[in-house]
Amino acid sequence: MYTNYKVAKMQGLIRKGYMKAQDKRMNLTNELLQNIKIIKMYSWENIFLSLLQERRTAELKELSKVQRLSTIATTLLYLFPALL
């Protein structure tokens, strides 16, 4: 039980990090879409594209952490009853 508690607490913290990274990317995407005419007029597409790619990479790193911890939690869920 204690292990499940620790894993669940870690999952919550990692999910918060993922949600923050996702929010940053979505805010940039919304800004990009709202100001598309200005971005096109001044040819800032490459700048925004690189910013968007950086934020997506950060989001994918956080998502990878979430998936790894989820795998660990599922493994523990099935492993502990077998050990007891």
Image (cartoon, grey):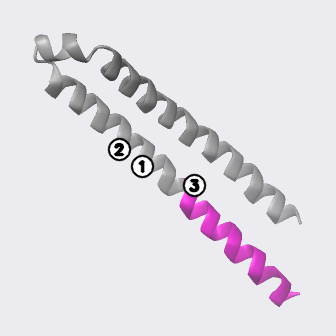
The kind of residue tagged 1 is: Leu
Residue 74 relative to residue 30: left or right: right
Question: Of the residues under marks 3 and 1, which one precedes in the sequence?
Answer: 1
Residue type marked 2: Thr
**Residue 51 bears which disc, if any?**
none
Residue corresponding to mark 1: 60
Q: CA distance from mark 3 to mark 1?
A: 10 Å
- Disc 3 secondary structure class: helix
Residue 21 horizontal/vertical position (percent): 48, 35
For marks 2 and 3 on the same chain, the one whose residue lies earlier in the sequence: 2
| Start-end of magenta stretch | 66-84
- Which structural element holds mark 2? helix
Along the viewing direction, whichever of 45 and 63 lies nearer the viewer:
45
**Mark 1 residue element:** helix
Is the residue 56 above or below the residue 65 in the image?
above
Percent position of residue 52, x then y: 30, 32
Marker disc for residue 57 = 2
> How many numbered callouts?
3
**44 lies above or below 70:** above
Q: How many angstroms separate mark 1 from mark 2 (CA)?
A: 5 Å
Q: Is residue 33 left or right of residue 70?
A: left
Residue drawn at point x = 57 percent, y = 55 percent: 66
Residue 66 badge:
3
What amino acid is at disc 3?
Val
The crowding category of the residue bearing disc 3, from other C-alpha atoms within 10 Å (few below 14, some 14 to 19, many at least 20), is many
Question: If the image is split into quadrants, where does the N terminus sit?
Answer: bottom right
